[in-house]
Amino acid sequence: MELTVEGGPIRGVTTGGVTAYLGIPYAGTPVGYEAPQPVVAWDGVRDATAFGPTAPQPPYDPPFDVLLANPLSDGDETLNLNVWTPGGEGRPVMVWIHGGAFRNGSNSIPAYDGSAFARDGVVLVGINYRLGVQGFGVVPDAPSNRGLLDQLAALRWVRDNIAAFGGDPEQVTIFGQSAGGMSVATLLAMPAAQGLFQRAIVQSGSAEAVALDSDLALVTAEVAKRLGVPATAAGLASVSTAELIAVQQQVSAELRAAPDPARWGVTTVQAGGGIMPLFPAIDGELVHQQPLAAIAAGAAAGVEVMAGATRHEFNLFTVPTGIAAGITAEALPVLLARAGLDPALASEYTGTPGEIFTAISSDRAIAQPTVRLAEAQQAAGGTAYVYEFGWESPLEGLRSCHALELPFVFDTLATATSPLYGSEPPQELADRMHAAWVSFAKTGSPGWSPYEPTTRAVQVF
């Protein structure tokens, strides 16, 4: 099927009543460290039947390369999106923002196939955005939060073009997981994003950002230093992308492995061995304050919000890596203190020292921020729904770990190849979760009671 969007006509492919348009540019080819530029028109009908290039990034390190899919594709037009549509008109729209710690991920991961959403009457859009230092590093003479600027450009493209696919630009839900969930929470707080969406889902994310002149600048400066170039747009652009990614990966790995991250001057630490050196920045232009504070002040009062977490988030980071097994009773209080926590907190948990540390890390980094986000939205007069994902992976020790819910939400269990899901993951659970996300996009309610401080309603999957 053919239709016309900004840039020119495109041709998709229809299968089983769903038409997919893949790899559509929503902005021009990224130039250096500039803000996203307008789409460049093309000649003739553009074929939109294959995924576009992914943002430059390293592959996942073991053991995550086996557990998490991360297909990589070279090319210049990395600011692209995919659309799955059932046709018709006035359909609700969902825009997916992938996770990956702001340094990995794409819209071409098999679990993110939007066919099931389109089958159920939703136009599904999956976007790519710049990652790593290119997307989130602080470069003094370049706009900050370039990855967020890309997300804004994609949402504006949806506003201006989605009607051609049968979508309603006044009925848009943004949703994302992990770094994508953090992106959603940040977009909720950003004045520049107001009016571009009406509903939002934060999966295993938090409403956090860091000061522009703190950790982010230090990490970018370290990458530039090792590359032997100034930490400027011209300096960083003077090296090859492959060199940049290799050094960025080296610095990131050393941060994660550092027994004392303070030696880097870096305080952006998620307990449990999950140090994320790249975050959205409070730059005073795009992000004006901590997203949670902005939401509490009413920045998203008119937006319906759903937020949730898996029950054992950090098991993904501490079990397959052996971190949990290596934590002794003697090491536990030291690790908690280093993370800025009272070691006495361990007495509130049960299990081995590694299990306790992982559970505390999960609560601190994701579960508690999820509740705080719901409370902030509710206190500001908005509506919030909360869920917990509790199905456990058959892989020993992983339990209900980070990212486990994704093929349940997208109803893509049939194509899930990760050992996380075993041979018989429960389709019935995928049916219920996927239906809740569809219901939220269509009606603003996922099918259970909103979160209130007195009832604290949580839907458990």
Image: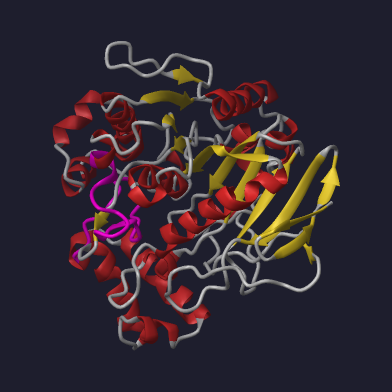
* Res 63 seen here: no
Q: Nearer the viewer, residue 272 or 376?
A: 376
Task: Indicate the quadrant where residue 319 lies.
Answer: top left
Residue in the image at 79% along x and 63% along y: 47
Percent position of residue 88, x then y: 76, 36
User: Coloring scheme of the render?
Assistant: secondary structure
**Residue at the image point whose x is 61% and y is 74% from the top:** 76
Q: Main secondary structure of the magenta part?
A: loop
Task: Look at the image and say whether residue 442 sits in the magenta stretch.
Answer: no
Q: Residue at x 42, y 30 (%)?
A: 305
Residue 64 x %, y % = 53, 53
Task: Say whether residue 280 is left or right of residue 6.
Answer: left
Check the image and report above or below for 83 versus 354: below
User: Going 30% across and 32% down the picture, which residue do you hit?
Assistant: 368
In the figure, is residue 447 to the left or right of 140? right
Image coordinates for residue 396, horizontal then vertical, percent: 53, 35
Q: Which range of residues does the magenta coloring cover?
A: 265-293
